[in-house]
Image (tube, rainbow, N blue to C red):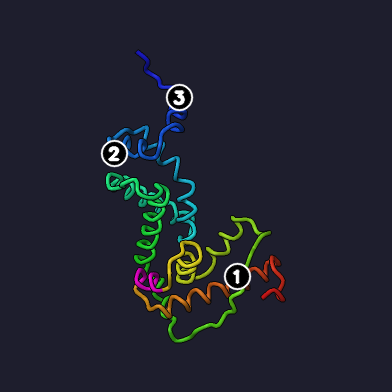
Amino acid sequence: MQLFVNKRSLDIEAESMTDEQLVNKCVSGKVSAQKTFYEKFARKMMGVCLRYAASYEEAQDVLQDGFIKVFNNLDRYQNKGSLEGWVRRIMVNTSLDAYRKNKKHQQDVSMDDVSYLVEDKGYIIENIQADDLLKLVQSIPEGYRVVFNLYAIEGYSHKEIAERLGVTESTSKSQYSRAKKLLRQMLIENNIVEESER
């Protein structure tokens, strides 16, 4: 009887499993499959959480809460669409739940009174590292950051964002415009783009 399992053999088994097989093993309670599932998605999902969180520690908490929701609902996944997309939606929703619980965002959200007109010149940033861009996005006010992520990265419409955050559509548009303006200013201040490119 073999008491120790070769880690490499587990890795090979995990690599050869389809998402459907992995989900089925997780649902049946196989701890090794759950570990494999976590390792498969944790890094990418941490990136999602970091975009919404105010700090690394907060992102870790959101990631943990998100994976609890994933594992609690994994039996509901019906193999329609990508598994990664399904996990990502849960992480985004968990990030939004954490955002809504944080009362500080209420100061950022009431923005209907002023609207910024920012010219829409599809900014393409080729020479900036992803980590640097993430730091810039994390440094903008929370309300701006959440709307920017939902609109520019996740692809939600302003109407959908308004419904999810309990704000008006014009507030969502205003927050997005302000986020873009702040990010552009930061890019200029950090000599990543020239001021004339605005």
Secondary structure at badge 3 equals helix
The N terminus sits in image quarter:
top left
Q: Which residue is mark 2?
A: 27
The residue depicted at 41 percent of the width and 80 percent of the height is 110
The residue depicted at 28 percent of the width and 35 percent of the height is 29
Amino acid carrying mark 3 in the image:
Ser
For the residues bearing labels 3 and 2, Cβ distance under 8 angstroms: no
Q: Is residue 10 left or right of residue 166?
A: right
**Location of residue 53 with respect to 42 vertically, above or below:** below
Q: Which one is earlier in the sequence, the residue at label 1 or at label 2?
A: 2
Majority secondary structure in the magenta region: helix
**Location of residue 52 with respect to 162 vertically, above or below:** above
Q: Nearer the viewer, mark 1 or mark 2?
A: 1
Tell me if mark 2 has few (under 14), some (14-19) or many (20+) residues whose alpha carbon lies within 10 angstroms of its own. Answer: some
Secondary structure at badge 2 equals helix
The residue depicted at 72 percent of the width and 76 percent of the height is 196
Secondary structure at badge 1 equals loop
The magenta region covers 159-165
Give how far apart the Cα atoms at labels 3 and 1 are: 47 Å
Q: Which one is earlier in the sequence, the residue at label 3 or at label 2?
A: 3
Q: Which residue is mark 1?
A: 122
> Residue 188: percent from the left, percent from the top?
67, 71
> Residue 25: percent from the left, percent from the top?
32, 34
Q: Which residue is mark 3?
A: 9
